[in-house]
Amino acid sequence: MSQHSIRVGVVGANGYTGIELLRLLVNHPHVDIRQVTSRAEAGQPVSASLPQLAGRLDLAFSAPDAAALAECELVFFTTPNATAMHMTPALLEAGCRVIDLSADFRLHDAAVWSDWYGEAHACPELLGEAVYGLPELNREAVRQARLVANPGCYPTAVSLALLPLLEAAVADPARLIADAKSGVSGAGRKANLGTQFCEAGENFKAYGAAGHRHLPEIVQTLTAAAGSQPVLTFVPHLVPMIRGIHATIYAELNDTTVDLQALYERRYAGEPFVSVEAAGSHPETRMVRGSNHCRLAVHRPDAAYSGASRAVVLAVIDNLVKGAAGQALQNMNLMYGWPETAGLDNQVALIP
């Protein structure tokens, strides 16, 4: 097990995900933060923008520089989509390891990626190498990876909710529904009319019902679990809160005799960041705010009204932590042989 501190760089650290990542990294016992980049705030002390980190991180933002980043052992990208893919090949060539929190390396098929993200992929040769960083599914592969594609927030919640059903082949993969809600921080820190307080407050809306960029990512993960491509209806919603995701999953069972509670408890036994709540529970987003935990509950609706074959799974995560920065730290811990929970216990959110 490696105990030395590693040199770490964070690219694009002035967005919500980058802020969360810095919050976690400054508390990690084996991390030496060397580079914190932001084109918009280059030259400004990090603590001037993030006073919560005053006395904890004595660095200034710098503009991204490939040579400086190559001096790091691990580089995190918390950048918009289609940014990391331009810098990652050179960093890997220099011997760095990379954890990308954008969507650049999540999809295995370059053509599918291009269809959803509107441009050609800059390094399609790396898509087959990138390990999808959902530890509860790919833990051993993450340990050996030099390039990890950190999952999206919605895909994390939806996948964790559905994996037990599909791996055990007790649900029909052709009849899956994911009804998911997220707080406004999921849209990022950029100025956007739809996420301004006067627009999002006291309001509730669906979006992306005809197709959302996270859909092919979820389907790719569930295909690996089910052994065949599932048919999933995925509809995300924006709710007037800052952080958190609640996903309600509907699945039709092939086997109505299965003990769903026992199935979920077995699947996630020993997982440090997935909790299967007691039968009849309804987990809430406030239960995971600022933490790297996913809380799950599984239900069988009243057969007299819903039929005997339907399962309902509830999943809650913090979109900025288990849905982004916390999961990235979890992956880093695996890559360097540290306890999976290092730097992730007893955390308190900087963003309410």
Image (cartoon, rainbow, N blue to C red):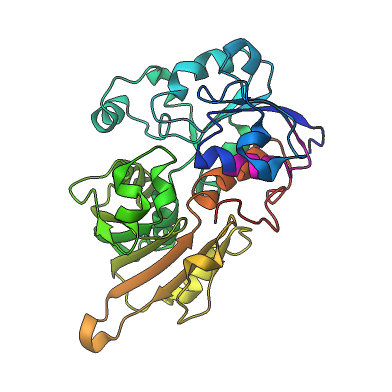
| Residue 336 within the magenta-colored segment of the rendering | no
Question: In the displayed image of the protein, which residue is found farthest to the top?
Answer: 67
Q: Does residue 189 appear anywhere in the picture? A: yes
Asked if residue 35 is positioned above or below residue 221 in the image, the reply reads above
At a point 48% along the width and 72% down the height, the residue shown is: 283
Counting the numbered discs, the total is 0
In x, y percent, where is residue 347? 67, 55
Q: Is residue 17 above or below residue 284?
A: above
Quarter holding residue 174:
bottom left
Dividing the image into 4 quarters, which one contains the N terminus?
top right
- Above or below: residue 216 compared with residue 112: below
Report the front residue among 2 and 341: 341
Residue in the foreground of this view, choosing between 265 and 70: 70
Taking the image as shown, residue 172 lies to the left or right of residue 131, namely: left
- Residue drawn at the location 28% of the way across and 22% of the way down: 119
- Residue in the foreground of this view, choosing between 142 and 322: 322
Instruction: Name the residue at 67% across, 45% down.
Output: 52
Kindly tell me whether residue 334 is visible in this rendering. no
Quadrant of image for the C terminus: bottom right
User: Residue 145: percent from the left, percent from the top?
Assistant: 58, 31
Please say whether residue 31 is one of the residues in the magenta stretch. yes
- Where is residue 160 drawn, in percent x and y? 45, 57
Residue closest to the far bottom: 304
Q: Position of residue 335 (x, y in %)?
A: 65, 36
Q: Hey, which residue is sitting farthest right in the picture?
A: 4
The image quarter in which residue 193 lies: top left
Residue 312, relative to residue 210: is it above or below?
Answer: below
Question: Residue 269 vs residue 1: left or right?
Answer: left
Q: Which residues are magenta?
A: 20-32
